[in-house]
Image (tube, grey):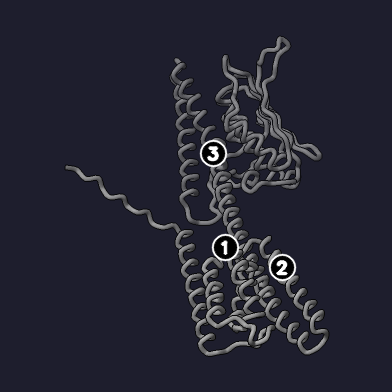
């Protein structure tokens, strides 16, 4: 005979614990007021009231009414309108007819609790009701007894009994609202900080992806190109040169990858990788794909006096992206032209397209646009159509301001680039040799 396990009671939530705690405190407060009513009644303390002594309620009736008012305080936090509707009228009647001093304490609670624990609407209604009742009491006293000592007593009692709990309740309510607003604001600030942290991580992740594509992808594309070329060459010397180039590119990729990983694993703030990215290395990549490639780099584009270093770094990164795409997807003829003008520096790389090969919208093309926008420039990567409407070439064109306008963190700073050495064109080298 099998028995099913007894259900395990779930642990109470913090909200349930807080509600139970409030109910216990309200019960204790109601019991305390009941004890005060009995103690004051037993001591014989009372006031003269408004009616004559022979017209007052008997003591047992006064105590019973006050204990009923005390019982309504069990709901002083959860349903303060109950305390207002029960303890308030009973306290006023007792002050007028019975004369028990405990009625003043109950009237205080009947006015304080709705303002303190009730809704904003209930608090305003309680205030308006108390002020109207006080005004009616004063007017009634003037009509019945005229201006005299009785009016002064009624005025003092009305002001003290009505004004004090209302002002106290509104003051406490105001401070409670200010504390809750501050806690809410602090929570929003924590959420904002967490969102910023997530955004920073996402930005860093994208930056790492761009860095890997800038440096590593270029080397690996050269490895792939020259190993495929070596496999198709019959000349042993040419095959050997291609394999040597592939080996050097593989070593460079491994070195740069180790440098980037070293920065990521370093605890040193501001550490930067020592990646080999410069104009001569980009020219070498292009000539590995097209030995007759046209490469023209204006020396003014690498002059810090002419072009801001952050713009130079962005231009170099854009060129690295474009060269990587040209080596991976392009064919001869290839041309890379960089010119510095009065207020802008331009880059244009054009390469032929291999059959059924056209760069997609991957990390490289997104990085080109990102690098240009980061320094206030523009860049496009698009096919160049022939007269027949067919794509024959791929074109990357970037136009950057010579001065920095808006730089986004690491995106445009020369963090991972090597020295910016002026690189002359292949034709200039032939003329000077």
Tell me the residue that label 2 is attached to. Answer: 129
Q: Quadrant of residue 300?
A: top right
Q: Secondary structure at mark 2?
A: helix
Q: Quadrant of the N terminus?
A: top left
For marks 2 and 3, give the one nearer the viewer.
2
Give whichever of 184, 72 is nearer the camera: 72
Instruction: Evaluate whether residue 286 shows in this view.
Output: no
- How far across and how far down the image is residue 132, in percent? 75, 70
Check disc 1: other Cα within 10 Å, few if <14, some if 14-19, many if 20+: some
Q: State which tag comes first along the sequence, 1 or 3.
A: 1
How far is disc 2 from disc 3 in space, using C-alphas?
69 Å
Q: Which mark is residue 209?
A: 3
At x 57%, y 36%, the residue is 214
Query: Mark 1 near mark 2, Cβ–Cβ under 8 Å?
Result: no
- How far across and how far down the image is residue 295, in percent? 66, 28
Q: Quadrant of residue 13?
A: bottom left
Give whichever of 147, 55 is nearer the camera: 55
Tell me the residue that label 1 is attached to. Answer: 79
How far is disc 1 from disc 3 in space, using C-alphas?
60 Å
Check disc 3: other Cα within 10 Å, few if <14, some if 14-19, many if 20+: some
Query: Mark 2 near mark 3, Cβ–Cβ under 8 Å?
Result: no
Is residue 110 shown above or below 259? below
Instruction: Evaluate whether residue 250 shows in this view.
Output: yes
Check disc 2: other Cα within 10 Å, few if <14, some if 14-19, many if 20+: few
At x 78%, y 80%, the residue is 141
How far is disc 1 from disc 2 in space, using C-alphas?
18 Å
Left or right: 62, with 309 as reference point: left
Q: State which tag comes first along the sequence, 2 or 3.
A: 2
- How far across and how far down the image is residue 228, in percent? 47, 21
Q: Secondary structure at mark 1?
A: loop
């Amino acid at each position: 005979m099998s028995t099913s396990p007894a259900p395990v009671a779930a642990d109470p939530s913090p909200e349930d614990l807080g509600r139970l705690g409030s109910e216990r405190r309200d019960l204790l407060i109601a019991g305390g007021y009941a004890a005060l009513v009995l103690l004051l009644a037993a001591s014989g303390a009372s006031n003269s009231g408004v009616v004559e002594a022979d017209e007052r309620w008997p003591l047992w009736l006064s105590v019973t009414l006050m204990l009923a008012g005390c019982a309504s305080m069990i709901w002083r936090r959860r349903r303060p309108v109950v305390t207002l509707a029960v303890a308030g009228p009973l306290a006023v009647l007792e002050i007028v007819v019975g004369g028990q001093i405990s009625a003043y304490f109950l009237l205080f609670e009947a006015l304080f609790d709705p303002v303190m624990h009730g809704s904003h609407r209930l608090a305003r209604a309680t205030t308006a009701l108390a002020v109207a009742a006080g005004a009616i009491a004063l007017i009634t006293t003037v009509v019945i007894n005229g201006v005299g000592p009785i009016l002064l007593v009624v005025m003092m009692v009305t002001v003290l009994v009505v004004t004090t709990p209302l002002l106290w309740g509104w003051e406490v309510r105001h401070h409670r609202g200010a504390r809750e607003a501050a806690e809410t604001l602090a929570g929003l600030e924590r959420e904002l900080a967490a969102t910023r942290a997530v955004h920073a991580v996402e930005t860093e992740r994208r930056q790492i992806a761009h860095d890997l594509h800038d440096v590593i992808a270029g080397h690996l594309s050269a490895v792939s190109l020259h190993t495929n070329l070596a496999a198709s060459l019959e000349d042993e010397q040419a095959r050997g040169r291609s394999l040597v180039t592939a080996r050097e590119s593989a070593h460079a990729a491994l070195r740069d990858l180790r440098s980037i990983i070293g920065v990521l694993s370093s605890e040193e703030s501001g550490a930067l990788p020592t990646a080999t990215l410069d104009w001569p290395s980009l020219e070498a990549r292009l000539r590995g794909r097209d030995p007759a490639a046209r490469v023209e780099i204006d020396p003014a584009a690498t002059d810090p006096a002419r072009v801001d270093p952050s713009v130079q770094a962005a231009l170099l990164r854009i060129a690295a992206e474009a060269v990587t795409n040209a080596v991976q997807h392009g064919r001869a003829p290839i041309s890379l032209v960089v010119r510095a003008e009065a207020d802008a520096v331009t880059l244009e790389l054009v390469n032929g397209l291999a059959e059924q090969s056209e760069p997609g919208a991957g990390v490289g093309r997104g990085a080109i646009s990102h690098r240009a926008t980061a320094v206030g420039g523009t860049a496009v990567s698009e096919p160049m159509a022939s007269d027949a409407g067919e794509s024959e070439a791929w074109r990357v064109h970037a136009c950057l301001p010579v001065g920095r306008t808006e730089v986004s963190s690491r995106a445009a700073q020369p963090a991972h680039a090597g020295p910016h050495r002026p690189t002359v064109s292949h034709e200039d080298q032939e003329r000077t040799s």
